[in-house]
Image (spheres, rainbow, N blue to C red):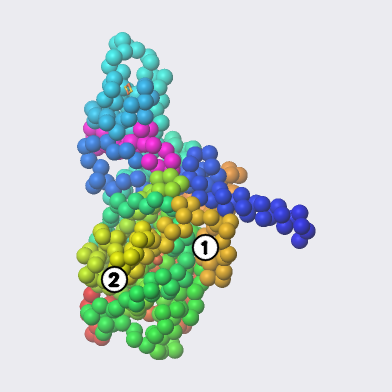
Amino acid sequence: MTTSKTNSTAKSRLKFLQELPRTGPGTTAGEMLRRYWHPVYLSRELKELPVSVRMLCEDLVLFRDAKGNPGLIGAQCSHRGASLEYGQIREKGLMCSYHGWTYDVRGRCVDMPLEPPGTKHKEKIRHLWYPVVEWAGVIWTYMGPDKESPPPLPKIDVLARSDGEVHLKQGDIRNYNYLNWMENFADMGHAFALHSLVPMEVPEELKPFNDAAIRSWVPSRLDFLETDYGMKTVAVWDTGDPGMKFVNAWSIAMPTHWRFSGVNAGLPPDFTDDRREAGGMLRIIDDTHFEIFRYTLVRKGNFTGNFIPKKMATADRGLPQTLEGTVEKKDYDKRRYSAWEGIAPLEDLVLQESQGKIADRAAEHLATSDRGVILLRKILRKAMEDVDSGKQPKRVWREKKEMVEVDTFHGHIKASELEISSKNLPSSLNGRGLIRDSAGNLIY
Ligand code: FES
Ligand SMILES: [Fe+2]
């Protein structure tokens, strides 16, 4: 390569890395993100008061009209800018409490009580609005240019499953860029270092079903594969039986969904066949904030306990309230998070936040363990370029594709049946991947 070509490749790489974490309107990455549906709020949490929600650097207000239909509109009133967060629900929509201008769920101004009767002024007002859909207990929005006819909402399979109970939770807000989080899921290697700082114990009840022949936490194979929905990581361990492998897979569906299975994200030392499916998605607030929505599918036959029973009272995989791990706290520890080791979600928070509000990617030195991160960036870069040149990015399907099937796997597979490709691994449907005794009865 000539020097000038090398320079221009380096320049365009740098430009991409700087654009990548941006989420606002008019930015290349922000415009790419606006081609997807995003979660805004859990249905059960939206009651009779409007709530302010910042999405992709835009200040908005979410409300239900008198019929219960959700609406998402600009936070500042089109009249003189009072916040509609303090608005009142009225028959026709959301009324600004200051002078009574009222907006319906599509941003049309339907009332101006202080103007002369018959005024046409309200027809001239079109307040900022975005389409919303309520599905699977979640209110979703599309903030792209095609607001009048957005692409259909792609339905993430685990939220639609009826063979178990879906547990949904929102409210974990982080003060750093969302890609610190997403890149963590493209980087399974970190799990074998960070999450083994404090070796975890297999719960007593699971011990009889745990494959004790697997001694090393580090898998014999770690593959990163592009799929139609995004990408996945497949880790393979050798077992005591040459005909049998143990597999753990994590997946990312564009742009902010992640999935895994097993009691502890499928991390060692859980070498059982339990495949409680879990994961989540992000509400991107702005360049340096996001909120985590976690989901877990709990089926009959799933182990619902935890690897760290004392510190984590619930099985929702969230953070401990004290933001303390399981190690002893030293009285001279003055770090923002002290004694943080021992609980995987907390370990992730600490290290992701420590990368910086926006990580300095230009200063990185990537290595072979970063193949997943490189693949995720490649996928995002292509999506940004596609949107920039007027095309639909990955996983925006115009045709009505009902489900986004995201495969995750955690358990034993016959070596002869293991195919590491972008094709789905065996799914956990039909009762596969639940712990059974030798007579075939469900144990957990
Ligand atoms: S500022 Fe909202 S009606 Fe006047
Ligand atoms: Fe992690």
Q: Residues within 10 Å of mark 1 (few under 14, many from 20)?
A: some
Asked where in the image residue 213 lies, by quadrant, the reply is bottom left
Q: Is residue 101 rendered magenta in the image?
A: no
* Quadrant containing ligand 2: bottom left
Q: Quadrant of the N terminus?
A: bottom right
As drawn, 186 above or below 418: above
- Tell me the number on the disc at residue 373: 1
Highlighted range, magenta: 54-75
Which residue is located at x 44 percent, y 59 percent? 354
* Amino acid type indicated by mark 2: Glu
Instruction: Pick whichever, 109 or 392, lies toward us.
Output: 109
Q: Position of residue 233 (x, y in %)?
A: 47, 68
* Amino acid type indicated by mark 1: Val
**Is label 2 in contact with label 1 (beta carbons under 8 Å)?**
no
Q: Residues within 10 Å of mark 2 (few under 14, many from 20)?
A: few
Q: Position of residue 145 (x, y in %)?
A: 49, 37
Q: Position of residue 231 (x, y in %)?
A: 49, 62
Asked where in the image residue 116 lies, by quadrant, the reply is top left
Residue projecting furthest to the top: 116
Residue carrying label 2: 328
